[in-house]
């Protein structure tokens, strides 16, 4: 079941490495310091892509969950759990960078802004869903429950967001109705960061799915090696 | 019952299993099992713990899905005709499937409604009498002894008059007297024209009334008697050779 | 038709069992009461206008007590392996979900009906308002709709008491927000038209998650 052979993975890692270098250059050298916020604003180029990858990861898990329930192929379950783990990781980064960014700018560690709060709520949920996987003994059940939780969780994301947004709004407006409020240089840097983070996600996903696959192979081989009765 | 008879003539086997396999992740519980249970017979599946008996009977009862293979119960395909099959089968295991807080009557009434049993109250009285629980019919099931609960569980299993009855280790936890009552109940079931498929690890109890015996070992059928009922000595030999390996 | 007859039978069974033991409802009621009283004391010392926090307190009480009820409803099915008894019947699996949902909503509403008068006394708020009852009903349905699905899963795990709350609360955030907001608006005497946004959100949540749970329940039960 090696969906991506070693050469593919190496190319992907190489490409990602390249993207990281390019993005780092853009973020720290190329893009001018923002007038109002200062240097801290550069966190924006890590914060937004992390949040994006979190969302992407949970979307992928949603699709994988549906695919698993329909097809019952183990690889969909592997993709799903891997994606959720990575999604939680990047959501953590998004939350932490959001907090670090908020402190000097808005003088508070936490802004109850809709996007950030939704991320926090969903972070809690997805962590709980990973916990559930750990305490379910049967493999088949674990996969089914995981799939249902991925589906329910993702459907809930827009609902939670809507509810919280109806409730509060302090996040800085990035895309106003006239057009982008960001300078073109910033847009390029942001775009590059987004691509880099997405590539990072793909790398991690492939590696993680492989680990999952090998782990399941190991269990299977262990099972076979139990001597059969005559 | 007459339509039942016509259908019976159409399909020869009460249960027909071809190449059934079941895996739970990397663990294979059943491997390429083939099985045929004729109507109106008692077939017993024996084997040690972990042989896959419970897995097999749960699949036949629609509680579990096969990983591969074909299963037909009462001539109907398991996957396609799940709900209809459930109408025609009864299932009892060492778990009672009864609500402890409710009384015997209330339990039967609930299941009767779920199965849409006609003339429910009459049927309930009939069954309560048959399993000998008339004195305790209004007591919470929690307060009944294990043997009584097991009898009530069988009553629940045949409430809707199923033609095929699956019993998973029904003798577990029963004392001598309760086991005897169960055995006589089973004989009655057979006399009524039902088919019974039973699993047990208890060689003697299991086989004494059986028309056919299968030995299941590590997910595979290793031995099958033919139509004639096996004698106790034969069974001992079989069991020792296949199960204990000597 | 068979679907609804099955649903009715399951609800009747759960009600009958509860009437006998009274364990679930009393636990729910006591727990909710405890929450309301403790919060009352906890905030009265600090907050000028206790009325401001009243809606939040009410819904926290409902949510926590609701979790108790949701858990119980499936724990009782686990004893004696009854969930398999249900699966063996010819009714649709989704009817089992619906039956459990209706039962759970019913129990929560009964608990809420008993808590409301006490709440009214402690927080000095008017509760004889059908608009308030509508919000409570919609909120309860939403909470129970997704709660029933999650409880069915959580009950199969080793740490079931912990599992349900940590899964359910994040998902129920929209319900809690919408319910507390509209409750607050109604208690403040605003006309119903002001709460339409929240009511619509509640209704949307109820419908979306009941449908998803109905579809997903089948997968929870199968082996």
Image (cartoon, helix red, strand yellow):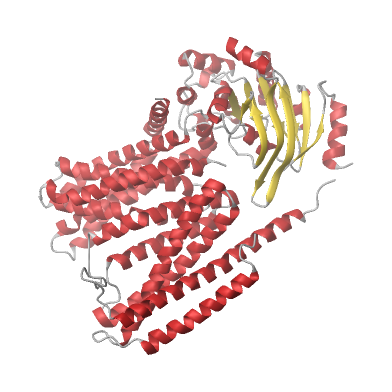
Q: Quadrant of residue B96?
A: top right
Q: Residue furthest right?
A: B246
**Above or below C147: residue A153:** below
The residue that appears at 28% across and 87% down in the rendered structure is A38
- Residue C176 in the image: x percent, y percent? 28, 53
Instruction: Compare residues B48 and C149 and report the one nearer the observer.
Output: C149
The residue that appears at 21% across and 62% down in the rendered structure is C43
Quadrant housing the C terminus of chain B: top right
Q: Is residue B56 left or right of residue A63?
A: right
Instruction: Compare residues A161 and B152 and report the one nearer the observer.
Output: A161
- Residue B245 in the image: x percent, y percent? 87, 42
**Above or below A110: residue A76:** above
The residue that appears at 58% across and 69% down in the rendered structure is A207
Instruction: Compare residues A42 and B174 and report the one nearer the observer.
Output: A42
- Residue B166 in the image: x percent, y percent? 64, 28
Q: Is residue A30 left or right of residue B102?
A: left
Q: Quadrant of residue C222?
A: top right
**Above or below C49: residue B150:** above
Quadrant housing the N terminus of chain B: top right
Q: Is residue C124 visible?
A: no
Q: Is residue B45 visible?
A: yes
Q: Is residue C136 left or right of residue B158?
A: left
**Above or below C100: residue A154:** below
Number of numbered tags placed on the structure image: 0
- Residue C59 in the image: x percent, y percent? 26, 51
Q: Residue furthest top?
A: B2
């Amino acid at each position: 079941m090696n969906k991506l052979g070693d050469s593919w993975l190496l190319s992907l890692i190489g490409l990602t490495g390249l993207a990281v270098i390019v993005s780092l250059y853009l973020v720290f050298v190329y893009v001018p310091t923002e007038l109002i916020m200062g240097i801290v604003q550069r966190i924006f180029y890590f914060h937004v892509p992390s949040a994006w990858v979190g969302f992407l990861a949970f979307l992928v898990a949603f699709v994988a969950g549906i695919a698993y329930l329909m097809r019952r192929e183990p690889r969909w379950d592997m993709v799903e759990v891997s994606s959720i783990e990575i999604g939680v990781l990047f959501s953590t980064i998004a939350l932490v960078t959001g907090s670090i960014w908020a402190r000097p700018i808005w003088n508070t560690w936490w802004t109850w802004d809709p996007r950030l709060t939704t991320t926090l709520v969903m972070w809690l949920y997805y962590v709980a869903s990973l916990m559930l996987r750990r305490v379910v003994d049967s493999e088949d059940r674990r996969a089914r429950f995981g799939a249902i939780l991925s589906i329910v969780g993702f459907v809930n994301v827009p609902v939670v967001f809507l509810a919280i947004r109806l409730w509060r709004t302090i996040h800085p407006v990035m895309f106003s109705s006239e057009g982008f409020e960001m300078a073109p240089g910033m847009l390029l840097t942001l775009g590059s960061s987004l691509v880099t983070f997405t590539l990072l996600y793909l790398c991690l996903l492939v590696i993680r799915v492989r680990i999952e696959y090998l782990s399941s192979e190991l269990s299977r081989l262990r099972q076979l090696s139990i001597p059969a009765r005559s | 019952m007459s339509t039942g008879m016509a259908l019976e003539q159409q399909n020869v086997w009460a249960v027909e299993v071809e190449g059934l396999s079941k895996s739970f992740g990397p663990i294979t519980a059943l491997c390429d099992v083939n099985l045929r249970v004729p109507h109106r017979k008692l077939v017993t599946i024996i084997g040690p713990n972990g042989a896959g008996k419970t897995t097999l009977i749960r699949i036949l009862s629609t509680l579990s899905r096969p990983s591969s293979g074909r299963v037909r119960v009462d001539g109907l395909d398991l996957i396609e005709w799940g709900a209809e099959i459930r109408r025609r089968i009864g299932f009892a295991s060492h778990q009672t499937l009864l609500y402890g807080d409710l009384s015997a009557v209330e339990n039967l009434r609930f299941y009767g409604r779920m199965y849409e049993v006609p003339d429910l109250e009459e049927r309930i009285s009939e069954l309560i009498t048959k399993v000998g629980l008339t004195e305790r019919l209004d007591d919470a099931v929690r307060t009944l002894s294990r043997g009584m609960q097991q009898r009530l569980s069988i009553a629940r299993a045949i409430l809707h008059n199923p033609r095929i009855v699956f019993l998973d280790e029904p003798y577990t936890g029963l004392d001598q007297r309760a086991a005897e009552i169960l055995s006589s109940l089973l004989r009655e079931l057979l006399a009524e024209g039902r088919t019974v498929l039973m699993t047990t690890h208890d060689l003697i109890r299991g086989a004494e009334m059986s028309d056919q015996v299968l030995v299941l070992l590590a997910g595979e059928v290793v031995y099958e008697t033919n139509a004639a009922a096996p004698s106790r000595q034969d069974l001992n030999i079989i069991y020792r050779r296949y199960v204990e390996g000597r | 038709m068979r679907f609804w007859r099955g649903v009715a039978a399951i609800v009747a069974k759960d009600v009958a069992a509860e009437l006998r033991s009274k364990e679930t409802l009393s636990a729910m009621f006591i727990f909710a009461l405890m929450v309301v009283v403790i919060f009352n004391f906890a905030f009265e010392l600090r907050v000028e206008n206790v009325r401001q926090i009243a809606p939040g307190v009410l819904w926290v009480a409902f949510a926590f007590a609701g979790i108790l009820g949701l858990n119980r409803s499936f724990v009782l099915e686990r004893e004696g392996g009854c969930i398999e008894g249900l699966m063996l019947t010819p009714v649709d699996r989704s009817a089992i979900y619906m039956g459990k949902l209706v039962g759970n909503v019913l129990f929560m509403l009964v608990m809420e009906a008993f808590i409301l008068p006490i709440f009214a006394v402690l927080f000095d708020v008017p509760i004889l308002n059908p608009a308030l009852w509508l919000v409570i009903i919609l909120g309860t349905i939403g909470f129970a709709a997704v709660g029933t699905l999650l409880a069915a899963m959580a009950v199969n795990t080793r740490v079931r008491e912990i599992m349900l709350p940590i899964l359910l609360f994040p998902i129920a955030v929209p319900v809690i927000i919408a319910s507390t907001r509209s409750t607050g608006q109604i208690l403040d005497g605003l006309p119903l038209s002001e709460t339409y946004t929240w009511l619509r959100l509640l209704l949307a949540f109820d419908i979306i998650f009941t449908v998803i749970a109905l579809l997903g329940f089948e997968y929870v039960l199968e082996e």
